[in-house]
Image: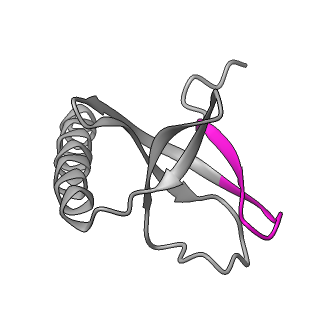
Amino acid sequence: MDNEFAADLITLIDDEGKEHSFEILDVIENDSGCFYALLPNESGSALDAGSYYIFEVIDDEGEQVLAEVEDEELLNKLAEIFESHFEDLYESSESDNIV
């Protein structure tokens, strides 16, 4: 059976070499760059399982990597956009389930 609703997962390695698994919630590409909203996908993780994280795609010596967004104003704007997407998706999926 095909699982068409399987989560898109990504593994990131932190500065200490530890791997962390995340579910990709959404991706935004705009004039400021490309940004990912990621939800921790690990039990017993030190990461806050109730929060999502926003990362920016940057070029590191010719290789694309994800890095924390350091500009707090940009981070707040991105959070608003992502949360608007989440609300639209949630409202859409709820209305699809009404019989």
Image height check: is 14 above or below 26?
below
Q: As rendered, which of 30 and 44 lies closer to the eye?
A: 30
Q: Residue furthest top?
A: 2
**Which color scheme is applied?**
one colour
From the top left corner, tell me how far across and down residue 13 is, in percent: 74, 56
Horizontal side of residue 50 vs 46, given as left or right:
left
Q: Is residue 53 magenta?
A: no
Total residue callouts = 0
Quarter where residue 45 is shown: bottom right
Q: Which residues are magenta?
A: 7-21
Determine the residue positioned at 54% across, 30% down. Answer: 5
Q: Residue furthest front?
A: 61
From the top left corner, tell me how far across and down residue 57 is, in percent: 48, 39
Q: As rendered, which of 71 and 42 lies closer to the eye?
A: 71
Image height check: is 43 above or below 59?
below
Horizontal side of residue 48 vs 36, given as left or right:
right
Q: Residue furthest right?
A: 17
Q: As rendered, which of 48 and 16 lies closer to the eye?
A: 16
Quarter where residue 93 is shown: top left
Horizontal side of residue 50 vs 71, given as left or right:
right
Viewport quadrant of the N terminus: top right
Q: Is residue 13 magenta?
A: yes
From the top left corner, tell me how far across and down residue 21 is, in percent: 70, 54
Determine the residue positioned at 25% across, 67% down. Answer: 72
Quarter where residue 76 is shown: bottom left
Viewport quadrant of the C terminus: top left
From the top left corner, tell me how far across and down residue 8 is, in percent: 59, 35
Image height check: is 3 above or below 68?
above
